[in-house]
Image: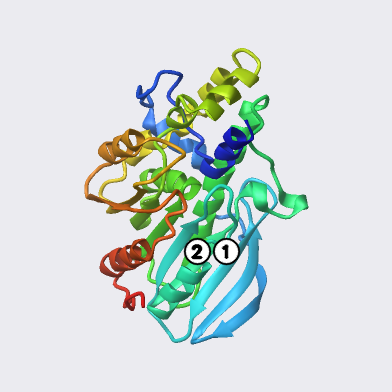
Amino acid sequence: MQRAVRLVAILCAVASVGTVRGQVRAPSDPVALARLFDYDGKAPMDVQGQVVAERGGVTIHDITYASPVSGRVPAYLVVPTGPGPFAPILFGHWGEGVRTEFLGEAVRYARAGAVCLLPAYPWVRPAEWRRPVNRFDKPDEDRQTYIQAVVDLRRGIDVLFEQRGVDRTRLGYVGHSYGAQWGAILTAVDRRIKAAVLVAGVPDLDCVFMRDDPDIVAFRTSLPAGQLETYLKAQSVLSAVNYVSRSAPTPLLFQFSAFERNFERDAMERHYAAASQPKRVLWYDTGHEVLDAQAIADRGSFLATQLGLKVKPVS
């Protein structure tokens, strides 16, 4: 049971299609769904922070900015020296991770000519701004927190676009697991994104909770009757598989693990199949974390091509 609960935090995929494996309930009104992530773009961003490191022509800022929903969003802002123009890149960490997950890659991309922002999700922020999730008895509150995570990422784009020397026509996105889920939504509802890398994402919660894995079965049976079904229904409007089909014309790179333990290969293949063109999928002999040097190199090559960066090969 503990492993099953941990899977929720790891994947943090806030989407479902009901209780029958493989059945996708498509949104009936895409415009209405997109409005879930609307926000006041004219509200003050109120960016605050300080420099925490300078090395190799790159400066790392530890900042916060005002969330359009509630509280403030902690983030790292990684900035190269020089006048630009720079490609902006937004990062989404995995569900059980924090904003440092892609920091090393962000420094690498900054040296190649990018300004990078790495925000933290609402459930890993300081206490005064934190909003918990995985509360199966409070599905509506969880859904609102997940929506805030996406809205705060959209606001992060605004923060990036205000940085000196940024070329707004070259915005990239990189997201892992939960971050891949949000990336699927972002590419459908925010046309500012010009290229996206989706790492180890799931199409919906069905592929997690309806598996025959003994821990998952035990977790399902441990909940009060009907609670899981109610929770999944409440999150179904956020099913990533239904958004990724509307990503065009944004190029997508999917990166999946050949030894994934948290969901089956057919779920990953279904996710990729649902995506709009242009798209590409790559597989790696690794686990859910996708800690593979080739995966890092492939992300760099994809972003270099799509965003006009001069990314050096991984050595």
* Left or right, 41 with reference to 267: right
- Looking at the rendered structure, the kind of residue marked 1 is Thr
Mark on residue 100? 1
Where 17 falls versus 241 (above or below)?
above
- Looking at the rendered structure, the kind of residue marked 2 is Phe
Residue located at (50% from left, 38% from top) = 13
Mark on residue 102? 2
Q: Position of residue 200 (x, y in %)?
A: 41, 47
Where 271 falls versus 249 (above or below)?
above
Where 95 falls versus 264 (above or below)?
below
* Left or right, 122 with reference to 205: right
Q: Is 10 in front, or is 183?
A: 10
Q: Are marks 2 and 1 in contact (CB under 8 Å)?
A: yes
Q: Position of residue 144 (x, y in %)?
A: 60, 36
Name the image colouring: rainbow
Q: Position of residue 219 (x, y in %)?
A: 60, 25
Q: Is 35 in front, or is 175?
A: 175
Q: Is 255 in front, or is 279?
A: 255
Q: Quadrant of the C terminus?
A: bottom left
- Quarter-of-image position of residue 197: bottom left
Q: Position of residue 58 (x, y in %)?
A: 51, 82
Residue, far top = 225
* Left or right, 103 with reference to 24: right
Count of numbered marks:
2
Q: Residues within 10 Å of mark 2 (few under 14, many from 20)?
A: many
Q: Secondary structure at mark 2?
A: loop
